[in-house]
Amino acid sequence: MCGIAGIRDLSGRRTPSREELAAMARELRHRGPDGFGLWRGEGVGFAHARLSIIDLAGGAQPMPNEDGTCWVTYNGEIYNWLELRPLLEARGHRFRTRSDTEVLVHAWEEWGEGFVERLNGNFAFALWDGRTRRLVLGRDRLGIRPLFWAEHEGRFLFASEMKSLLAAGIDPRPDPLGFDQVFVLWTTVAPRTVLEGVRELAPGHLLVVGPEGTIRSRRYWDLPDPLPPGDLLADPGEAARRLRDLLEDSVRLRLRADVPVGAYLSGGLDSTAATALARRVTDAPLETYSITFADRDYDESAEQEAAVRALGTRHHRVEVDYAAIAEALPEVVALAEKPILRTAPVPLYLLSGLVRSHGRKVVLTGEGADEVFGGYDIFKETKIRAWWARDPSSRMRPALLRKLYPFAPGADRRAIAFFEAFYRDGIEHPEDPGFSHRPTWRNGMRNRAFYGERLREATRDYDPPADVLALFREALSRRDPLGRAEYIEFKVFLAGHLLASQGDRMSLGHSVEGRYPFLDHRVVEFGQALDPRLKLRGLDEKWILRRAVEDLLPPEVRERRKRPYIAPNVRSFLDGPGRRLAEEILDRDAVAETGLFDPGRVAALARKAFSGRPLGERETMAFIGILTAELLVRAWRDAVARRGSPIDLAAFPSRELPNGTSEERTTWET
Amino acid sequence: MGDLTIQQQVEQFIRDNFFYEGDAIDPDASFIETGIIDSTGVLELVAFLEETWGIRVANEDLTPENLDSLAKIEAFVQRKMAEARA
């Protein structure tokens, strides 16, 4: 796995300096600690920070085609490179390395923009085509790998993480609408970010900077439209067989690496299935990793033990307590680069640290199965609410919601009428494209009560749900309520939070690459072609997945009901290091100085939290969200302060085009 | 708090405890529809009513009919106090 960055002068004349490219790459060294590489051509420059996984000796980047007219800097894995390479060789392309990177440049030469549709994997790349003087950026279908860009002083800048753009001179000014998206929707939605002027290239998109400096982007992939009911795959036996074949192939591809591949094993269905499939398709011993919580309310050790015993892996654990969460939080926020409304990413960051401490770089994870196979409560909730909507006066229909959230604080028997009323929101409009998410979004809107003057003013006429629904209007118009819920989950929460703040950024924070067998696009497309009743059967989640892998699962896992993954939130900040951190960050003067939130209200919220009275769901979101937003502003300041620190160019091997403009002309031939 | 009406006291509690900003709360505005209080908040509200007016709120009293607006709460508290005196 790696980090990429680069600069294209939009007038085509000014060539970026090695120092500025090195400064951008330096910000990404956690993503790629094994070595840096720079390349410069006329008016363009690429940087790369490398984590070596395939072709350890020959895979250095940026990498050219045969004659140095095309260059690529790339982060990710093209799992089907072994299949693509002979196709390209048959058409006359010569390969110098045995890395997946080189496939990219030749595939570009051969197929042009359409090449990206042939790639199976996760990736973010930039290609320079010197023949047409075009810069092409691309990002994988679901958004596993990040890519941000900005225009600044006549130049186009791009990077895996926004901190690289700050290193290149972008000044960090909060985008109020980006913050509003996070507080209402839980994440920004590409192309918007929390930084003014900085854009995220949306998943499944290409972006081209033309020779005249024009910028255009286009979508090359989306979740496929639902099939007509008669064409859906509805036969359980056939569906389970086909899914099993697909998953075995997906896992087999994701075990391709020149270093050992491990697996996260939480004891839930998804990670246990991924691990079990890996055991099946390879004889290599398998190392697995999990989080345990000192607070037993969150702990899943017993299920993990059962899975480890059944699968015979060598298992490692990291125990997480309140202090560990609080102590890691500033670093987590600096990596996530947006506020988070719960602490759940933190243990994932500590988990990747455990993997790294065992000298490993690559892990399989079960992420994505909940989106593909109807695992989330919001899908059940949508199903129940859609049913309720057909008879809004029914008292029996909403009662099913209690079954759904038996442990939710709101499900306290005594307040059940209010609990149901919460989900009644929007019930009279089942045709609303945002029907599934209205209760959640309305909850998020309440966070606005804490905004300071400027944020409040700037977001007065902004409606984040409406904005997002407009962005996805066409795709949503072709789906039923459950299909819409899925689409929104893929595009908003998965892409913006789970794969980003809780995924890529947390694992690469410790130089560990996550691989996602359930997010192979063939698996995702298969999920969309399934009869919904095979995913959510009644209220039985991921029914078809369970069936496809049931022979591989220990009974403890097979029979287990889904438990949402949560970590201690406000509890981590009531005493010890967490309390000290929260008191410092939420201090009235500090909050006033940052200027995002209302200092008095934040102080009142902090008092209520520190009193030890349990906070409601909303107040918890606000507490963690404000704390991490404040930490983010500090992380920006730190990034700006690093601009001035000296750079040792010896650590940044550089290459130039044969007709390059620099004094240094290292030839590529080896 | 002696001079304040029940509605005023409850409104003040909502402002302080649920970080409600904005204009005066319409006595008939539904807390659920306006999103002022969620289901967790209801339990805090009930604890406040019990403490402030010395009433006992039974589980079956916890309904939107009794507690979903300032006006409903006032009527509910007065009824409970009357019952206690009777």
Image: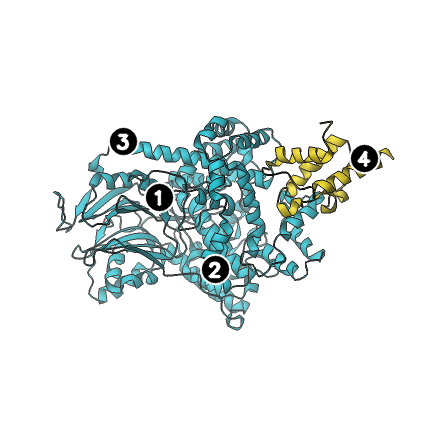
Label 3's element? loop
Crowding around mark 4 (Cα neighbors within 10 Å: few <14, some 14 to 19, many 20+) is some
Q: Which residue is mark 2?
A: A473
User: Does residue A169 appear to the left or right of B4 in the view shown?
Assistant: left
Label 2's element? helix
Residue A614 vs A668, above or below: the answer is above
Q: Residue at x 73, y 33 (%)?
A: B5
Chain containing the residue with disc 1? A
Q: Which mark lies nearer to you, 2 or 3? A: 2
Checking the image for residue B81, the label placed there is 4
Checking the image for residue A390, the label placed there is none
Same-chain check, marks 3 and 4: no
Chain containing the residue with disc 4? B
Q: Which residue is mark 3?
A: A645
Chain identity for the colour cyan used in the image: A
Q: Quadrant of residue A15?
A: top left
Whichever of callouts 2 and 3 sits on the residue coming sooner in the sequence is 2
Q: CA distance from mark 3 to mark 1?
A: 19 Å
Checking the image for residue A161, the label placed there is 1
